[in-house]
Image (spheres, rainbow, N blue to C red):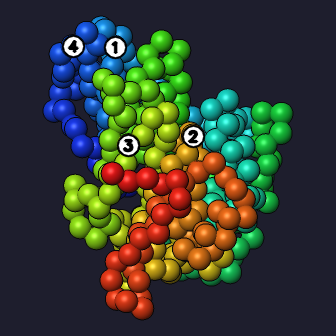
Amino acid sequence: MILEVRFLILFFLVFSCSSNKQIESSDNKVYNIQGYTQGTTYNIKYIFYKEKIKKNEIDSLLSIIDYSMSSYIESSNLSLINNNQTVQIDSLLQKVLNRSLDLCFQTEGAFDVTVAPLVNAYGFGVNDDIKNINDNFFPNVGCDKFYVQDGEIVKNKNIQIDVNGIAQGFSVDFIANYFNEQGVFDYMIEIGGEVFCSGMKQGKKWVLGISDPLNHPSDFVFRVALKDKALATSGSTRKINNIGDSLYTHIISSHSLSPIKNNLLSVSVIASNCIDADAYATAFMAMGLDESKIFLKSNMLDIEALFIFQDTILGKIADFKTTGFNVL
């Protein structure tokens, strides 16, 4: 059962320096919107015959999400729930928690939003106060420790929830839905490396680069072309903490009450929506390669995955792709 503090591992092949401007010239123009949100950056490109959607609209939507589920804003709905000041859940947070519970039970706890105490204890959460890990953490971690009913959360006061491992994927889907409502259907929306591509970019699919997990993020090991699909990447090499003489990755298993230990370096998942791609990428990192293969074969999900790992036998970096994960 894990939760990860998301980091940017996926970069895009075309990146504009402007905040909101036309960057190509044709009957349908390409517009670019960039900014900051959720402790990271966002990058949006859309194709339309005129400037239809502006940066202030995107920032307003992202602000709504922040005040729903940010663990860094004291007045957010999630913070008030964690501080036992309310049990009421707004509609956005309810969607995220319901899907989180579904995925937690499906993955047998490989993805779990209740590991916030462990994330904080290892210095990756709201609190940087690194604590001793002991058996007292176990009773307060697990997807069976809370549920949602009639717009309220039911939990004991010690349960803490952190949705950072799924919120960016939800945010991408939320913005994508707004574009669809505005009648714009050719776009690419990326937040912190999680992305959804809709339609085409002037007759061609959107092309994304997947970073080499051991080198600079702009060093691509694969490129993929997407249309009406989401792509999310999770990894263990970009964000670590030094505690004493040990280095800890930010991806933490509540089975062991410690950061994950396997040979996976990164997992990229293609799915029909970004919230699922985001969560499955995190879950597969926790499962490890062999368990992930079994899970994919057993569940027959409409997702594709790319695993980059350290081959301990051959002593080199290797990869495994599901049959539908096509690279250029």
Which residue in the protein does label 4 denote?
Answer: 26
Look at 56% across and 39% down and name the residue there: 273
The tag earlier along the polypeptide, 4 or 2, is 4
Q: Spatial distance from mark 2 to mark 3, Cα to Cα?
A: 14 Å
Q: Is residue 191 above or below residue 184?
A: below
Q: Earlier in the sequence, mark 2 or mark 3?
A: 3
Task: Label 1, secondary structure: give it.
Answer: strand
Q: CA distance from mark 4 to mark 3?
A: 22 Å
Q: Which residue corresponds to mark 2?
A: 272
Q: Are marks 1 and 3 in contact (CB under 8 Å)?
A: no
The label on residue 225 is 3
In the structure shown, which secondary structural element does the residue marked by tag 4 occupy? loop
Type of amino acid at the residue the image marks with label 3:
Ala
> Which residue is found at the position 68% from the left and 81% from the top?
135
Between 307 and 58, which is closer to the camera in this rendering?
307
Depth-wise, is mark 1 or mark 3 nearer the camera? Answer: 3
The residue tagged 1 is 48
Mark 4 and mark 2: Cα distance apart in space: 29 Å
